[in-house]
Amino acid sequence: MSDITGGLVWHLRALRARTGLWQTFRDDVERWLANWQPKSSSLVIIGPSAGWCLPFSFLSRFTQIHCVDIDPLASPLFDFVHGRSLRRAGVTITWSREDFFAAPARILSAYPASAVLLSNVAGQRCFQLKDSQATEQSLKDVREALAGRDWASFHDRLSAPGFNVLPVREWSEQINGVQILERYGLGGEWLDHLTGDILPASVTRRIIPWRFSSERVHLVEAGIGTIYPPS
């Protein structure tokens, strides 16, 4: 497996960076997840990896967590990072080693009452498929499978070489990659991860900058996909 989407190299990098270079990003993700209040006490996490960027404050709110990840290292490393603390908090954790994107509706049908978190995974689809139309269709299929569910996602939207320290920003409309860069006053060539349509058009989006390495920055989009009816 590519070190971009998983495997030993990825995990070694994450282990070194999580309390250093990634700390600000992890804190920002924790603040964003605090705003999501799903009604279910059960959570399905798609692509949790080892949970390097997932906070205990969020995970411990659930009594049952089911993780879906194709990476064989994800389960033992997640247990290393979170297992003991979550077990002490009374959280039951189960795993499926499946490719969620190959059959999202089927996999989700096994957990009809669970909330769903796409954990920084949708932006990797462009590396797996290497075809823009296939990638966009795959992510649209995921959005359709999640319709009516209580769900949220954070995912790579754009990435590029750089050393930028950028602020978190938020807006309530769907905008394209060029508009995102304009709002940040950024130029140059950026990789579009083709995730612009995974969230419903009407939901609020938050851009959380991620200093992925000392030489690369990602603009991670986070949003709550559930469209709640007016109270």
Image (tube, rainbow, N blue to C red):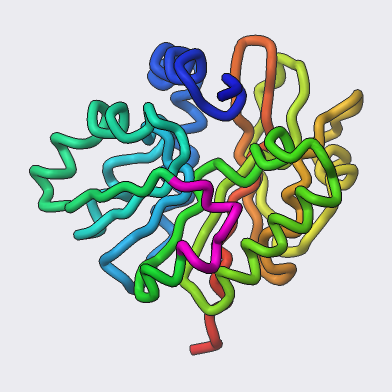
Residue 185 image point, x, y percent: 85, 33
> Residue 212's quadrant in the figure?
top right
Residue 35 or residue 138, whichever sits in front: 138
In the image, residue 183 lies at what x, y percent? 82, 42
Q: Residue at x 65, y 56 (%)?
A: 205
Q: Which residues are magenta?
A: 98-107
Q: Residue furthest bottom?
A: 231
Percent coordinates x, y for residue 187 in the rendering: 90, 27
Residue 71 rendering spot, x and y as whole percentages: 45, 33
Quarter of the figure with the N terminus: top right
Relative to 7, residue 26 above or below: below
Query: Closer to the camera, 36 or 130?
Result: 130
- Residue at (67, 61) in percent of width and height: 199
Query: Considering depth in this image, is 188 or 44 the residue closer to the camera?
Result: 44
* Chief SS of the magenta region: helix
Left/right placement of residue 85 relative to residue 174 reads left
Residue drawn 67% across the image and 30% down it: 218
Residue at x-position 59% and y-position 52%? 101
Whether the magenta-drawn stretch holds residue 100 is answered as yes
Left or right: 85, with 222 as reference point: left
Rendering quarter of residue 158:
top right
Would residue 29 be found to the left or right of residue 59 on screen? Answer: right
Q: How many marks?
A: 0
Determine if the magenta segment contains residue 136: no
